[in-house]
Amino acid sequence: IAPAVDGKPTKAAAVKHLLELPATEYKFGDTLRYRFVATDNRSLTGIDSQFGPQSTTGQVFTISFNDTAAAAAKTTQLWDELRKQLNALLAAQVSLRKQSDSLTPKITIEDARTQTTAIGTGQNRSRTPPPVR
């Protein structure tokens, strides 16, 4: 890195580097981790042999090689499954609501028990999560 215009050492610089990543060496599912090491041009070895250049490492960067089409298909499949489950839940709730419409203040206790038992059973089923696949 060249000195600044005023001749003083440069305090900051932006460096661009193209990483060569041949397709033959990587496949979907691979992960590449890298980081940069910066070394200054300090040269004070005339004062002490340990006062040579200094190095520091930067943060670790990660590149994941993913098949975006497969990831999109999986996401679509998950959304479709969720939509299917939510529609089934909604249909069950609508059915239960329709069953409860028949309840009126004039209903006998025995009739209420008969109708609400079926409704309660349906509500309990709607609260039970589906089996995990």
Image: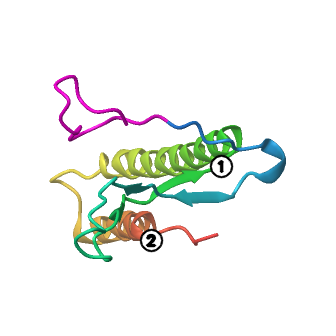
Q: Amino acid at mark 1?
A: Phe
At horizontal 37% and vertical 64% (from top left) the residue drawn is 123
Residue 91 falls inside the magenta stretch: no
Nearer-the-camera pick, 109 or 53? 53
CA gap, disc 2 and disc 1: 39 Å
How is the protein colored in the picture? rainbow
Screen quadrant of the N terminus: top left
Q: Amino acid at mark 2?
A: Thr
Residue 128 is marked as: 2
Residue 10 falls inside the magenta stretch: yes
At horizontal 39% and vertical 52% (from top left) the residue drawn is 96
Residue 65 is marked as: 1
Can you tell which quarter of the image residue 107 is in?
A: bottom left
Question: Which span of residues is magenta-colored?
Answer: 1-16
Left or right, 38 with respect to 132, comes to left
Q: Residue 61, relative to residue 47: is it above or below?
A: above
The single residue placed furthest to the top in the displayed view is: 5
Nearer-the-camera pick, 90 or 84? 84
Left or right, 22 with respect to 112, comes to right
Image spot of residue 111 (x, y percent): 32, 65
**Crowding at mark 2 (Cα within 10 Å: few <14, some 14-19, many 20+):** few
What secondary structure do most residues of the magenta stretch adopt? loop
Image spot of residue 19 (x, y percent): 61, 42
Nearer-the-camera pick, 34 or 77? 34
Q: Residue 131, relative to residue 93: is it above or below?
A: below
The single residue placed furthest to the right in the displayed view is: 24
At horizontal 80% and vertical 52% (from top left) the residue drawn is 25
At horizontal 65% and vertical 49% (from top left) the residue drawn is 65
Task: Choose the circle earlier in sequence order: 2 or 1.
Answer: 1
